[in-house]
Image (cartoon, rainbow, N blue to C red):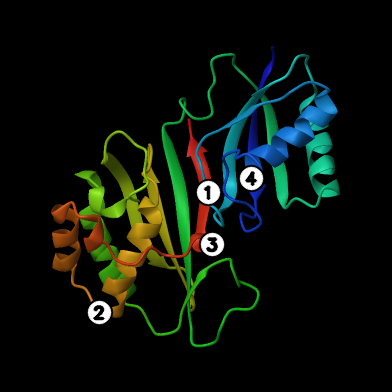
């Protein structure tokens, strides 16, 4: 069966996350329904990573097997057309043939996420439910400096959901940068081979406390080393988070 690699973009707000769930709207289920309709056989898609309800994607990667060879353009146009017909804010950005042993999840060497913060006095309009709004000024330099204490290999028990199903809380974080990209926008960039459930949103909420001046860098270190979920800052809202890209 020919295998294809696709890059997917979506607005996460209408969905209960990426993963298929019985009776609930999910991104995976919407794509599978569209592909099954045009391929005329049951299709199962596999994603590089799961996103929670409300989390967006610019560069989610999936792989899929079809029973016959299709042109990449046909897969893209047919899938996008059927998704649009159903009103889904999901788009296939790119399609290419893949090796039989390519796996969107297990072949990945790193995953990159962005968390957007709009830092201004005025409330959000265009960016409503596209970023976290923080009215009062944040100290971005302090946030970035503190964030470096999370880079590397650590036990991230403090920064993972109590519902996280990962066997181990130990992860190696390759990058956690906090940058002011414009007068009003701050972005947090996180890269690692894999992340724990709610890990990046936990980082974002905790670093906000540093930016507000409510926490010092040492407070963050102490929370990290406590291995205690209750020591984490407030988990940031999901709609500020974007799955940006996957490296292979």
The answer for how far apart the CA atoms under marks 2 and 4 are is 38 Å
Q: Secondary structure at mark 3?
A: helix
Quick check: marks 2 and 4 in contact, CB under 8 Å? no
- Which sits in the foreground, 237 or 102? 237
Can residue 8 be seen in this snapshot? Answer: no
The answer for how far apart the CA atoms under marks 3 and 2 are is 24 Å
Q: Secondary structure at mark 1?
A: strand
Closest to the camera, between mark 1 and mark 4, is 4
Q: Position of residue 213 (x, y in %)?
A: 25, 79
Residue with the mark numbered 2: 213
Residue with the mark numbered 1: 244
Closest to the camera, between mark 3 and mark 2, is 3
Quick check: marks 3 and 2 in contact, CB under 8 Å? no
Q: Position of residue 113 (x, y in %)?
A: 46, 50
The answer for how far apart the CA atoms under marks 1 and 3 are is 14 Å
Q: Position of residue 178 (x, y in %)?
A: 36, 63
Q: Residues within 10 Å of mark 4 (few under 14, many from 20)?
A: many
Image disc number at residue 26: 4
Among the two numbered marks 4 and 3 on one chain, the one whose residue lies closer to the N terminus: 4
Residue with the mark numbered 3: 239
Q: Position of residue 51 (x, y in %)?
A: 52, 47
**Residue occupying image coordinates x 60% and y 71%:** 127
Among the two numbered marks 1 and 3 on one chain, the one whose residue lies closer to the N terminus: 3
Closest to the camera, between mark 1 and mark 3, is 3
């Amino acid at each position: 069966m020919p295998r294809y690699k696709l890059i997917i973009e979506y607005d996460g707000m209408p969905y209960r996350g990426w993963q298929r769930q019985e009776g609930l709207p999910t991104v995976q289920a919407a794509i599978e329904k569209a592909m099954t309709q045009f391929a005329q056989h049951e299709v199962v898609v596999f994603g590089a990573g799961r996103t929670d309800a409300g989390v967006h994607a610019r560069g989610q990667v999936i792989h899929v097997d079809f029973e016959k060879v299709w042109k990449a353009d046909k897969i893209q146009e047919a899938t996008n057309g059927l998704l649009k017909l159903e009103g889904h804010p999901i788009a296939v950005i790119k399609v290419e043939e893949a090796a039989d042993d390519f796996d969107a999840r297990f072949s990945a060497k790193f995953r990159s996420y962005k968390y957007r913060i709009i830092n201004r006095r005025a409330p959000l309009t265009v960016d409503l439910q596209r970023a976290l709004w923080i009215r009062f000024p944040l100290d971005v330099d302090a946030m970035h400096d503190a964030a470096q204490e999370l880079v590397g290999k650590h036990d991230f028990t403090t920064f993972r959901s109590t519902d996280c199903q990962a066997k181990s809380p130990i992860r190696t974080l390759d990058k956690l940068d906090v940058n002011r990209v414009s007068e009003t926008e701050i972005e947090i960039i996180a890269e690692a081979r894999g992340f724990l459930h709610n890990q990046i949103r936990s980082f974002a909420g905790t670093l906000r406390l540093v930016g507000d001046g409510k926490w010092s860098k040492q407070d963050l270190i102490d929370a990290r080393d406590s291995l205690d979920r209750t020591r984490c800052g407030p988990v940031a809202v999901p709609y500020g988070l974007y799955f940006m890209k996957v490296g292979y």
